[in-house]
Amino acid sequence: TLAFIDDEPAGFALVRSVADEAELLLLAVDPSFRRRGVATALLRGIVDDGRAGGVADLHLEVRAGNDAVRLYTAHGFAKVGERRGYYRGKTGQVYDAHTYRRAL
C-alpha cells in the first residue's frame, strides 16, 4: 500500500495475508511527511482492506521502545507476546521484540 501527499510518495506499508490472518510486515513514512496522518491513513486502509478480504486478525512485531508502539496501541493493537533479545543494534545493543494483535 502506498501513500501520497500532493503527488509525492509519503509512505508505504507491506502486509501479507494467509487465510483469515494478516501480518503488517513494514510501515514506513518519509521523515518529511511525519506527523501529518500518513501512518494513520495507511493503518486504516490496511484494516479496511483486511475486513473486506475476510481477515479476522492483524498481527505485527515491533522493537521494544519504538515510537510506533503509541501509534499501534492508539489504533486498537494489544501486546500479545515478547521475544527477548530478538533485535541487534549496530553497536551490539540487544532489544526485545513485542508482538501485537488487533481483531478486525
Image: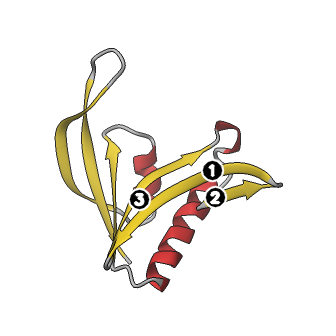
Per the image, label 3 sits on a secondary structure element best described as strand
Direction from residue 93 to residue 41 in the image, left or right:
right
- Quadrant location of residue 76? bottom left
**Where's the C terminus, which quadrant?**
bottom left
Asked if marks 2 and 1 touch (Cβ < 8 Å), the reply is yes
Direction from residue 77 to residue 39 in the image, left or right:
right
Give the alpha-carbon distance from disc 2 to disc 1, as whole Å: 6 Å
Q: Amino acid at mark 1?
A: Gly
Per the image, label 2 sits on a secondary structure element best described as strand
Q: Amino acid at mark 2?
A: Leu
Residue of label 3: 24
- For image coordinates 51% across by 69% down, the residue present is 46
Direction from residue 95 to residue 36 in the image, left or right:
right
Relative image position of residue 32 (x, y in whole percent): 70, 38
Residue of label 2: 2
Per the image, label 1 sits on a secondary structure element best described as strand
- Categorize mark 1 by other alpha carbons within 10 Å: few (<14), some (14-19), many (20+): many
Residue of label 1: 11
Looking at the picture, tell me which residue is in the foreground, 41 or 16: 16
